[in-house]
Image (cartoon, rainbow, N blue to C red):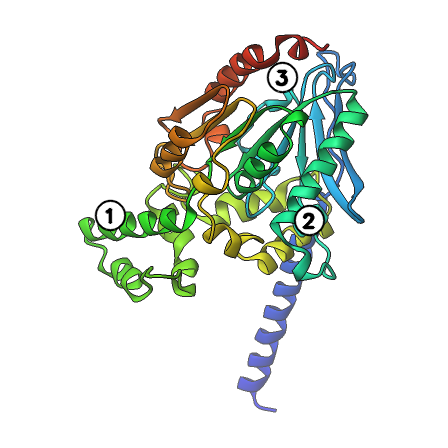
């Protein structure tokens, strides 16, 4: 064997050894960041805070074990059920502390087919709006019974807001109020607005490469797959996606999901397996075919919309139009001037101020622990 061949083989072996070591190191680090147990709330002396809760549990909801995180610094506070969008986003609360648990018992439920509640054998035909509505009501009743509350608060963010308004309209007796964050309305129109906005923005900036990609996948009477592949990258690049500052799904969402210590490694894999199977959202086709201003024109409880003015994932203007049409006993639209699609994460202090005010308006006694 010639000297050149021997040298090449040694280099290959060194490279393989390096890659194996790197992969093993990454797996060890990832495992360290995957203990899978929520940390308790501690007082100033380092003891578990009295009457607090910090747990991850699985509950049988309509025949399927579904997971959720429950967090509160004081169990006497009212209960708030959080409905996530196209992917569970509890892990973002670590990077962007919204501090909801300071004034609510917050339930970060991961819905059927997503995150903690993802199973490969869930029939695709069971992933329907009707099923999601039924699951939401079942989770609500579980929480009402467990925490001794006649009513709870319901918060839907992004795709979760599509489910949330249906639930609130159908079962107002279960809830103090409904809060829509990045509230959907007529989402097909929202995507067309986003497409035209991005096309103009990139054209004005002289980014011919991005303009060409957008023009290659125009939204007409349908939303092409090519546009959906490009959409998140194009939105984040100009600050109108998940958050105003987020520029990449990888650094902004994927890596925070991997470094959240409260999931096991297997659960982190489930987050992304569920997302890969669902695409934009498990109910995407139903969402695109629905105009909520005609489908859900009335909700018989107080309704509040929180919306970032830079949000093009879900149109700010269309949400405002829906709000104006919506019939509710009390309603409020809150504009977040520094936010895109995640105002509760981007402007947590403003969120806290508004929620405390709303809780006093809706039911002061409940907020005092009665």
Dot placed on the residue nearer the N-terminal end, 2 or 1: 2
Number of labelled discs? 3
Mark 2–mark 1 Cα distance, whole angstroms, equals 37 Å
Pair 3/2: label in front: 2
Q: Residue at x 61, y 43 (%)?
A: 88
- Which residue lies under the disc numbered 3? 103
Q: Residues within 10 Å of mark 1 (few under 14, many from 20)?
A: some
In the rendered structure, find residue 121 and report the number of the disc placed on it. none
Q: Nearer the viewer, residue 348 or 37?
A: 348
Dot placed on the residue nearer the N-terminal end, 3 or 2: 3
Q: Residues within 10 Å of mark 3 (few under 14, many from 20)?
A: many
Q: Is residue 110 above or below residue 10?
A: above
- Which residue lies under the disc numbered 2? 112
Mark 1–mark 3 Cα distance, whole angstroms, equals 40 Å
- Which residue lies under the disc numbered 1? 201
Q: Residue at x 23, y 55 (%)?
A: 207
Name the residue at the bottom extreme.
1
Q: Nearer the viewer, residue 267 or 219?
A: 219
| Left or right of residue 198: residue 124 | right
Q: Position of residue 177 (x, y in %)?
A: 58, 23
Q: Quadrant of the C terminus?
A: top right
Dot placed on the residue nearer the N-terminal end, 1 or 3: 3
- Residue 29 visible: no
Secondary element at image label 1 = helix
Q: Nearer the viewer, residue 145 or 104?
A: 145
Q: Position of residue 361 (x, y in %)?
A: 54, 11
Secondary element at image label 2 = loop
Q: Position of residue 266 (x, y in %)?
A: 73, 52
């Amino acid at each position: 064997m010639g000297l050149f061949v021997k040298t090449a083989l040694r280099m290959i072996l060194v490279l393989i050894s390096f890659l194996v070591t790197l992969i093993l190191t990454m797996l060890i680090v990832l495992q360290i960041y995957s203990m899978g147990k929520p940390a308790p709330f501690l007082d100033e002396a380092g003891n578990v805070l009295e009457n607090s809760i910090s747990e991850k549990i699985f509950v049988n909801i309509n025949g399927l074990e579904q997971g959720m995180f429950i967090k509160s610094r004081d169990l006497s506070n009212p209960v708030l059920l959080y409905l996530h969008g196209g992917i569970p986003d509890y892990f973002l609360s670590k990077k962007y502390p919204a501090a909801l648990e300071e004034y609510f018992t917050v339930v970060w439920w991961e819905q059927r087919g997503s995150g903690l509640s993802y199973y490969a054998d869930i029939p695709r035909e069971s992933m329907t709006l009707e099923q999601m509505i039924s699951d939401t009501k079942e989770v609500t009743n579980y929480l009402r019974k467990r925490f001794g509350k006649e009513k709870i608060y319901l918060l839907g963010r992004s795709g979760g807001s599509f489910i949330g308004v249906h639930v609130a309209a159908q079962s107002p007796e279960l809830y103090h109020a409904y809060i829509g964050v990045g509230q959907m309305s007529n989402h097909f129109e929202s995507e067309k607005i986003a497409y035209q906005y991005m096309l103009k923005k990139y054209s004005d900036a002289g980014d011919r490469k991005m303009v060409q990609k957008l023009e290659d996948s125009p939204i007409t009477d349908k939303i092409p797959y090519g546009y959906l592949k490009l959409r998140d990258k194009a939105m984040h690049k100009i600050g109108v996606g998940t958050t105003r500052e987020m520029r990449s799904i990888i650094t902004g969402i994927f890596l925070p999901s991997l470094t959240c210590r409260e999931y096991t490694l297997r659960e982190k894999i489930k987050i992304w397996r569920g997302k890969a199977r669902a695409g934009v959202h498990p109910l995407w086709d139903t969402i695109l075919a629905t105009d909520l201003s005609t489908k859900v024109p009335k909700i018989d409880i107080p309704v509040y919309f929180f919306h970032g003015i830079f949000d093009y994932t879900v149109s700010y203007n269309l949400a405002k139009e829906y709000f104006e049409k919506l019939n509710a006993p009390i309603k409020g639209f809150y504009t977040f001037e520094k936010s895109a699609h995640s105002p509760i994460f981007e402007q947590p202090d403003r969120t806290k101020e508004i929620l405390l005010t709303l809780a006093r308006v809706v039911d002061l006694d409940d907020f005092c622990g009665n």
